[in-house]
Image (tube, rainbow, N blue to C red):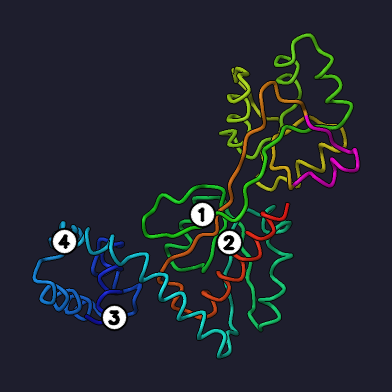
Amino acid sequence: MSLVRLRTFIEVYRQRSISSAARQLNLTQPAVSQHIAGLEVAIGRPLFERQVSGVIPTSAAEELAADIGDKLDAAEAALASARARSRDVAGALQLIGHADFMAEKLAPELAPLLEAGIRVRMHTGDGPMVTQMLLEGHCDLGISAHPVTDTRLKSETILTDKVIAVAAPSVVQRIKQAENFAQTLLQEPLLAYNLELSLVEPWLQHNRIELAELMPAMVGQDLRAHRSLLVQGIGWSVMPQFLCQQQLDSGELQIIPPPRAHTEINYYLIWMPSALRQPRVAHARQTLLWRLQHLDQSK
């Protein structure tokens, strides 16, 4: 039972389509069909029900995928890393993620990749854009605060951080001294990541503050822009602590004391399993996982 047939099976299983698997594997559709047919003969059971819109895994396919899927990914990643250590990994690596995280957390950890001759291309986008660019093959690795829900993608947590409400000291004092903390807070201008209040709403709900009709004064997906306004005494915001730790240490910003507690945010490194067949991508993934996870643990 060859590894090639097993990889073809896993790709068809994940894509739910022979044609999509063929594109990912750079094979013809007849070749993919032959691999699946040969595997079905080897195990003596059908693996997929063919339909006009794609294929549906049988119970035998579900069992086989559960048994070998992650193991096969790990084996291929290990082989690719070994190849990367023994030959040139030079080439362009396409990365996509949140702009502020890419600039303040990821960029300092890219030195080993650049020293190895890898040319890094950084792109910015929100969670849905990260997923789309990875699935379409336009980017090799992604970083997102959105948990992965698409089964065609794999991920690992690279950072867990506090999410805190912050403002300039004068604004914080005004809020703390008010008779009605929640009302005074919500009357201050809010700087938010998006209109859906992705970071703000969970913080308010966790602290039992009624959201009401809260309309941000400013919306922007690079929270460093919010930070520059906050230090000027304009409004308040909710953001990961790593983005404002320097300003907290200098006294330019202060934490707005939460009535109950801070919330948390997770960042994930995300990839397509098939992308790890490229030594460059496998090497970069392993390097970034180690460096970013080690950085998180050393805090």
Q: Residues within 10 Å of mark 3 (few under 14, many from 20)?
A: few
Q: Which residue is mark 2?
A: 96
**Circle 3 — which element?**
helix
Q: Quadrant of residue 283?
A: bottom right
Residue 15 vs 257, above or below: the answer is below
The label number, if any, that marks residue 60 in the structure image = 4
Q: Which residue is mark 3?
A: 4
Residue 76 vs 159, above or below: the answer is below
Query: In the image, what residue type sits under mark 1?
Result: Met
Residue at 58%, 89% (x, y): give it: 88
Which of disc 3 and disc 2 is earlier in sequence? 3
Which of disc 1 and disc 4 is earlier in sequence? 4
Q: Residues within 10 Å of mark 2 (few under 14, many from 20)?
A: many
- Residue at the limit of the structure toward the front, as seen here: 298
Query: In the image, what residue type sits under mark 2?
Result: Ile
The label number, if any, that marks residue 144 in the structure image = none
* Marks 4 and 3, how far apart at CA: 19 Å
Which of disc 4 and disc 2 is earlier in sequence? 4
**Circle 4 — which element?**
helix
Q: x, y percentage for residue 207?
A: 63, 23
Q: Which residue is mark 1?
A: 129
> Magenta residues?
243-255
* Marks 2 and 1, how far apart at CA: 9 Å
Which of disc 1 and disc 2 is earlier in sequence? 2
- Residue at the limit of the structure toward the bottom, as seen here: 87
Select label 2 or label 3 by which is in front.
3
Which of disc 1 and disc 3 is earlier in sequence? 3
Left or right of residue 54: residue 176: right
Residue 86 vs 234, above or below: the answer is below
